[in-house]
Amino acid sequence: MVKKSDEQNAKMLPDLCYSILSTGGDLIIIKLNETGYYPCDYSTADTEANRRLADELNRRMGITKAQEAAMVHGSVFGWHVPAADPSHYDDNGIPIKNQPGPPSSEYLESLACVKLEDEDEMEV
């Protein structure tokens, strides 16, 4: 069964992309909606050369670093997780951090139009 989030992510992702293994640096192929990866015949013993090759092959197919990152994570953790959504990555394929922590007291005060420390003196 394909979930709605899977369908939404699939619209933003290519059918396949190239990447490298984080262990070993081999060039690999990742296919949309499939778990795991496929070895690539173009792989070399040089991790940096494989990274350049993955970047070039993806570039020629119009695949962004964000899409590659989403494909890597989707193939490992499932295509329904937020990590399989390329909008969660910047242009370099780095995860975009959420806003840190809870809202500030200044923000909460602006919503309430009352200073939080004056709450005891507030008439209701």
Image: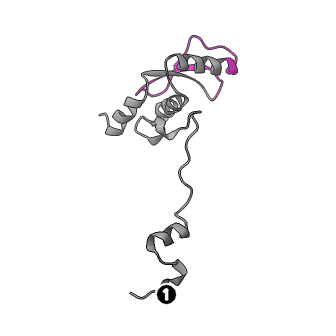
Q: Which residues are magenta?
A: 23-49
Residue 58's x, y, as percent? Answer: 53, 20
Could you say whether the residue bearing mark 1 is in a helix, strand or loop? helix
Answer above or below: position of 70 versus 103: above
Q: Residue at x 53, y 38 (%)?
A: 89
Q: Which residue matches tag 1?
A: 120
- Where residue 93 sits, quadrant-wise, is top right
Residue 39's x, y, as percent? Answer: 54, 17
Answer above or below: position of 114 versus 24: below
Q: What type is the residue that disc 1 sits on?
A: Asp
Residue count near mark 1 (Cα–Cα under 10 Å), binned few <14, some 14–19, many ≥20: few
| Quarter of the image that includes the N terminus | top left
Classified by dominant secondary structure, the portion drawn in magenta counts as loop
Residue 119's x, y, as percent? Answer: 49, 83
Q: Residue at x 59, y 21 (%)?
A: 55
| Quarter of the image that includes the C terminus | bottom left
Count of numbered circles on the image:
1
Residue 9's x, y, as percent? Answer: 40, 34
